[in-house]
Image: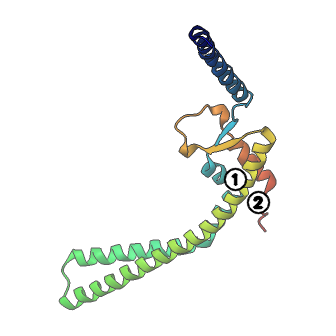
Amino acid sequence: MSLRLRSVALLAAFAAFPMAALRAQTAAHASHAAIAPARVAIINAQKAVADTEEIKQDQAALQAKYGPRQQEIAHLQQQVQDLQNQIDGGNLTPQKNEQLRQQLYDAQKDLRRKQQDLQSDVNFDRQGILSSAGQRMTEVIKKIAQERGIDVVIDSSNTLYYKPALDITAEATADYDKMFPPKSSK
């Protein structure tokens, strides 16, 4: 093959290469274009759970259960304050001052213990309630996503901006109340 023929063949090959690459790139873009964009929804999961009738009922039950202990703590706080005021008021004999200081120490110790016990008990009960409700809310969110063709649901606490139309919080709460109505109080 002559030098001239080789040059023409090489030039033709180089000219064909960009066209083949362009066709391959266009085909790749066409296949990506066929994939629909993901459908996204936003939820404030904490609000969705907190607004359910079941959680409202459970919150009232916790208040009723622990209300007497809260009142006892408030009474102890008042006793501590009264003892402190007596000590700060002066005009006490050394024996009376020592007696009041011991009473104050005992009352403060009792108050701290009761506050810690109450907080621990409330946290334990609340955690059980929220864990159960959270699992159920996850079921509700999955159901909504499947029914509406939503590909991903993102919690609003992790979102900087979204259009309000994407928010399914109220819908999730309403569906939760339908799927898991609160137990009737007796």
The image shows residue 97 at horizontal and vertical percentages of: 23, 85
Q: Nearer the viewer, residue 174 or 82?
A: 174
- Image position of 145 with respect to 114: above or below: above
Question: Which residue in the structure is indicated by mark 1?
Answer: 52
Question: Which residue position holds label 2?
Answer: 182
Graded by Cα atoms within 10 Å as few (under 14), some (14 to 19) or many (20 or more), the crowding at tag 1 reads many
Looking at the image, residue 135 sits to the left or right of residue 77; the answer is: right
Q: Looking at the image, do the residues carrying marks 2 and 1 touch, with CB atoms under 8 Å apart?
A: yes
Location of residue 152 (image quadrant): top right
| Crowd band around label 2 with a 10 angstrom C-alpha radius: few (<14), some (14–19), many (20+) | some
Nearer-the-camera pick, 73 or 136: 136
Q: Nearer the viewer, residue 13 or 23?
A: 13
Q: Looking at the image, which residue is at 76% across and 60% down? A: 182
Kind of element beneath mark 2: loop
| Residue at horizontal 59 percent and vertical 12 percent from the top | 11
Would residue 94 be found to the left or right of residue 183 on screen? left
As drawn, 106 above or below 143: below
- Mark nearer the N terminus (2 vs 1): 1
Q: Position of residue 96 (x, y in %)?
A: 24, 88
Residue 43 percent location from the top left of the image: 64, 44
Name the amino acid type tagged 1. Thr
- Callout 1 secondary element: loop
